[in-house]
Each structure stands twice: as C-alpha cells, then as structure tokens.
Amino acid sequence: MPVNRRQRQRAASGSTPRFQPPDASVAPRYTGPRTFARLPQVELPHDDVDAAVIGVPFDTATSFRTGARFGPEAIRSASALLRPYHPELDVDVFGTISAVDGGDIAITPGNARRTAEQIDAALQPLLRAGIVPLVLGGDHSIVLGELRAQAAVHGPVALILLDAHADTWDQYYGERYFHGTPFRRAVEERLLDPSRSVLAGMRGPLYAAADLEAPREMGFEVITGIELQAMSAAEYGKRVHSRAGAGPAYLSFDIDVLDPAFAPATGTPEVSGLYPREALALLRALDGIDLRGFDVVEVSPPYDSAGQVTALHAAAVAFELLALLALARR
C-alpha cells in the first residue's frame, strides 16, 4: 500500500497516530458516541488520517430481505467491544494507523443509480488524500460507487470477493442496477480487472448452470464455497496473491459468505457457509496484497439474534481489514 507524506513523517519521528479510540479501562465501552470502535468522528478529508470507516445505509436494491440500511449503525454498536491490539497478527492496529469514523454518506433511498453517484463523489476526495476507506453497508449494490471512485484514482483494481453469490447477473426484475449486478456493471465500465480478480464462497441453488459460468466467462477466477472450505487459508492466500499481483486491489466482504448459524441477519442467506474462524483466517492470508479499500455489506439487523451475533461478526471482519492495513504500514 502506498505511504503518503504524513505517514512517512510520522514513521520517521516515531510519533503515534493522532486519532485513536479512548482507553476502555478509563472510559467504559458502553459510553460515548456510537462510532466504529469508538474512534473519533471527523470531517473528511483530513490531513492526518490513514483510514476512515464510512457508512452507506442503502438497502433498496435488494431482492429478498431489506434492513441493511441499519447495518452501519448495528456494526458500529457491536464494534464497541473491539480493542486495539490484534494478538494473532501481533499488531497494535490503532497504535499503527490513524483511523477515524467518517460518518454516513447521504444516499437516495430507492435510487441505486443516484446513490452510486453519491458514493463515488464522497469517496474520491478521500482516496486522493491517501485515505483508505472501509465502507459499512448497506446492500451490495453500493460497491459500484465504491469501485468507480477506486478506478478514478487508482485505475482498474483487482477484486477480491468473499460472498455466497457472484453478483454478476446482467439484470434482475428487469433492473440493471441491483445488489446482484454490481460486478457485471463494474466490468462493463472497466472499473476492475477480472484477470487479476478472485471471487470466492459462491454456494447454494442457482437458476441455471450459467449463473456460475458467467463470471468465469467474464474473466474472473471463481472458487466455489465447497472448494473454498476444502482448501487451507494458506492455499487461498497463495491463489489470490498469484492472481492479484502487485497492483491495487479492493476487497468486498458480503456477510452471507458466513453460515447463517453465525450470520442470520442478511438479505439472502445460504446454508453451508464459512465458520467465522475460517473467514478470518482467509483474510489474514491476504497480508501483502495492495488493498486500497474494503467493504462489509448485507448486514440486516432486523433479522439478527438477541445477541447481535451477525453485527458482532461483521465488526470483527471490519477490524481484521483494518489490521491488514496496519500490517502494511508498520
């Protein structure tokens, strides 16, 4: 990942990041504003920010359950339990990167096309300032706006997708801008490079065999859910590293890649998914990929358990993504 001037200066001086969450031993985690991991909320772009958590509360491009508009709020609430040190990766995440919560993007309910434009316009200034966005959705249609911003700044990126669905349909109910179509639109707009991309976790019944063949015909490497569960995290990481190469990449994590036992609160759940520990291991295997942005999408809190298990797992995934950024910057 590229390092900008302020990051070089901070590294040279040995100073700590300007923005950090409060010490939970001093301020209890159930107090204060409900930002992600209780990080400071600042107006962006800002001169001393490495990563920004951004909410996109849009869910009116779904085909089954709605409710993901409440995803950013629920993930932020669950993230109050996060602590800054990652023991498995041996990195103090918020002691290494200066991370903030950038609030939510103002979207247009019921209008996926307009919302994509709003996301693009909001994220481009952050990317040009060297800030890596971590977007909390929202349904998966929002990724089109994210990829437009990425491509405008970095050129076509490699896509690393963990999802129960490939989301490469041409249309759904006659609509071309839907949560099942964003990656086909992204290929058509040349926002990403399929030859460097890996889609993994696809499972469940399909309308036809062509549903799984279509992304392969578009140039994507596809690893089905069955194949993914049969391989080690190290093997998955090796395949992604080999395919993505040294160029810029974008990681999109749909919570429905997890088994519904662990993520019941999602728009289109599919049985026989990943265990959370498997998903986190897969993410850790991506250390070294030049990740320029991330998202965690399709968390629909109205369908969650009383213990908010889906939101808890989404917050853990988001923290894992920030840890990858911290590893690259330390």
Image (cartoon, grey):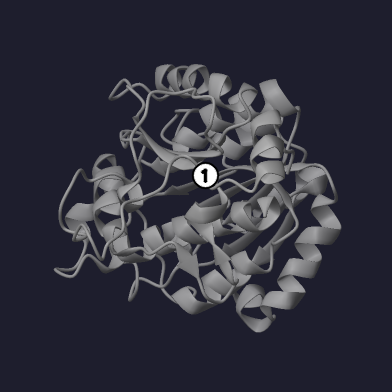
- 36 relative position to 232: left or right: left
Name the residue located 80 percent from the left edge and 60 percent from the top edge.
241
**For the image shown, how many numbered marks are present on the structure?**
1
Q: Which of 146 and 170 is in front in this view?
A: 146
Q: In this view, does 217 lie above or below 280?
A: above
- 197 relative position to 54: left or right: right
Q: Is residue 177 above or below residue 159?
A: above
Q: Nearer the viewer, residue 185 or 147?
A: 147
Regarding residue 262, the answer to whether it shows in the image is yes
Name the residue located 70 percent from the left edge and 62 percent from the top edge.
287
Look at the image and tell me in which quarter the C terminus lies: bottom right
Which residue lies most toward the front here? 13
Q: Where is residue 54 in the image (x, y as percent from the top left)?
A: 41, 36
Please tell me in which quadrant of the rendered image residue 1 appears: top right
Amino acid type at circle 1 is Pro
Q: Which of 105 and 19 is in front in this view?
A: 19
Provide the residue designation for mark 1.
Answer: 17
Q: Position of residue 316 (x, y in %)?
A: 41, 64
Name the residue located 85 percent from the left edge and 51 percent from the top edge.
245
- 308 relative position to 40: left or right: left
> 10 Å neighbourhood of mark 1: few (<14), some, or many (≥20)?
some
Q: Position of residue 156 (x, y in %)?
A: 75, 31
Please tell me in which quadrant of the rendered image residue 213 appears: bottom right
Q: In this view, does 153 lie above or below 93?
A: above
Secondary element at image label 1: loop
